[in-house]
Image: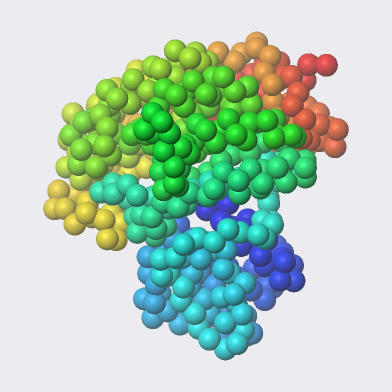
């Protein structure tokens, strides 16, 4: 989501006449798009800002912007810490960057963090890839997980209309993009805020309906979506993914903990049994589907036994990839105020143990690819070995093989897998 926001804001700046620079110390305008999900990311922001604030004292014409979740969280408080800033803007205001900058150029110091209805973006993002693209379909989040700052900084759920999404994807198809990842903080909640109810009583617009609507857009060969919430993941959605050939058999569904008492304290709204049922149903329809997820260790009050329940879930399901993190107290979240916080040493120990198991299970899952022929969408040259190109399988495994990037970029090719690792593959082109 942050990458997608960065591309949109870069597109606005280029439309205003700015030119991208690789050297931040030579730039006339610097925009930091920030994350506040964990404390270490937030502290990096202030480290970077300190260096640029010194530059601004020497060059008053430098424009300094902080956007994203730290900006939304801190608001005017960030100006007391870094008074050299020209613009502080939350993620809901990304599409208003040009208007806000005009106020800055008129001599104002601007803070834009008030909740607003997100306007449809008519600018073209400065996309980092010419092969794959992000498309936001829903902004914000209505969940209130006790550890998560996202609803406070990204606002309430706001779904884009199916027509606006279709139009953006249709243009991307005409521009030569081959793979689209539909994005949402809570993507399978898409459409809850849009009008309309079917005869059976469900919402008229859902992620499932949207997949059927956009599936046949000319030029688009692959579809992905992230991030899913177990509370809203339905068998109807799973069935649609199995029926629609362009939808990749890769699902990112965070479970966060394998213990029901911790899940209840987190206010996640499901049990580990419910989560297991979802994975079982996915594998019933698509036995080879790749499953990735997110997990948090060291949540306040987590006992060794409760942590072991997370290890047990990881052992039993066997994830292709798992993003792990030690619990980090975040401002304005209930769990940050609880008095049963775990020590950093205990959290670090559990994180290491979980990561060891994750790598082991991912390596086991990779074994199924050895000797198989996989379809790989070629995205770019391997920067570490320029004789190779790299791309991803439908199951989202990064794959390297020898080839000419000029000939292969943007093509889906057949690759025989000759070497497997926990999180990537190596193969040879099948001609």
Q: Residue 281 occupies which quadrant of the picture?
A: top left
Q: Residue at position x 14%, y 48% from top?
A: 340
Say left or right for 150 vs 217.
left
Q: How many marks?
A: 0
Image position of 431 with respect to 230: above or below? above
Give percent across and percent down for residue 390.
Answer: 70, 33
Tell whether 188 sits left or right of 86: left
Which image quadrant for residue 132? top right
> Is 363 located above or below residue 220 in the figure?
above
Residue sitting at x 29%, y 25%: 274
* Residue toward you, 140 or 210: 210
Q: Nearer the viewer, residue 421 or 171?
A: 171
Residue 93 visible from this viewpoint? yes
Q: Name the residue rendered at 43%, 70% in the picture.
A: 113
Residue at the top extreme, as displayed: 371
Horizontal placement of 43 versus 425: left or right? left
Q: Quadrant of the C terminus?
A: top right
Q: Give percent across and percent down for residue 413.
A: 76, 23
Q: Nearer the viewer, residue 144 or 115?
A: 115
Task: Identify the residue at the far left of this view.
Answer: 339
Return the residue found at the far right: 407
Residue projecting furthest to the front: 199
- Examine the rendering and report whether any part of residue 385 can be seen: no
Q: Position of residue 321 (x, y in %)?
A: 47, 30
Q: Which color scheme does this rendered protein use? A: rainbow
Q: Residue at x 69, y 21 (%)?
A: 375
Q: Position of residue 322 (x, y in %)?
A: 43, 32
- In this view, 190 is above or below 41: above
């Amino acid at each position: 989501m942050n990458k997608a926001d960065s591309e949109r804001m870069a597109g606005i700046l280029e439309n205003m006449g700015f030119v991208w620079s690789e050297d931040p110390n030579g730039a006339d305008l610097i925009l930091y798009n920030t994350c506040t999900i964990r404390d270490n990311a937030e502290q990096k922001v202030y480290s970077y800002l300190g260096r640029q604030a010194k530059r601004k004292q020497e060059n008053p014409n430098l424009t300094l912007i902080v956007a994203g979740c730290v900006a939304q969280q801190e608001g005017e408080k960030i100006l007391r810490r870094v008074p050299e800033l020209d613009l502080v803007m939350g993620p809901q205001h990304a599409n208003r960057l040009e208007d806000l900058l005009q106020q800055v150029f008129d001599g104002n110091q601007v803070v834009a963090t008030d909740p607003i209805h997100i306007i449809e973006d008519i600018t073209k993002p400065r996309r980092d890839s010419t092969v794959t693209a992000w498309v936001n379909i829903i902004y914000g989040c209505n969940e209130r997980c006790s550890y998560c700052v996202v609803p406070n900084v990204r606002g309430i759920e706001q779904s884009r209309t199916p027509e606006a999404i279709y139009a953006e994807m249709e243009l991307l198809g005409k521009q030569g993009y081959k793979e689209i990842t539909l994005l949402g903080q809570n993507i399978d909640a898409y459409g809850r805020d849009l009008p309309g109810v079917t005869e059976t009583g469900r919402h008229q617009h859902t992620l499932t309906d949207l997949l059927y609507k956009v599936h046949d857009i000319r030029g688009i060969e692959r579809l992905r979506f992230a991030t899913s919430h177990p509370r809203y993941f339905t068998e109807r959605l799973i069935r649609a993914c199995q029926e629609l050939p362009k939808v990749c058999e890769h699902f990112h569904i965070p479970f966060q903990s394998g213990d029901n008492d911790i899940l209840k304290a987190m206010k996640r709204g499901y049990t580990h049994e419910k989560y297991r049922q979802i994975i079982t149903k996915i594998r019933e329809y698509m036995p080879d589907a790749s499953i990735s997820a997110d997990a948090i260790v060291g949540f306040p009050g987590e006992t060794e036994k409760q942590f072991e329940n997370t290890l047990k879930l990881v052992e039993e399901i066997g994830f292709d990839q798992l993003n792990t993190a030690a619990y980090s107290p975040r401002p304005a979240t209930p769990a940050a105020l609880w008095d049963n916080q775990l020590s950093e040493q205990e959290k670090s120990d559990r994180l290491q143990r979980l990561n060891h198991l994750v790598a082991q299970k991912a390596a086991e899952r990779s074994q199924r690819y050895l000797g198989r022929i996989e379809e790989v969408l070629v995205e770019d040259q391997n920067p570490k070995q320029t004789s190779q190109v790299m791309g991803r399988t439908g199951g989202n495994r990064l794959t390297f093989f020898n080839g000419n990037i000029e000939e292969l970029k943007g093509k889906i090719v057949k690759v025989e897998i000759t070497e497997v690792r926990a999180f990537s593959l190596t193969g040879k082109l099948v001609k």
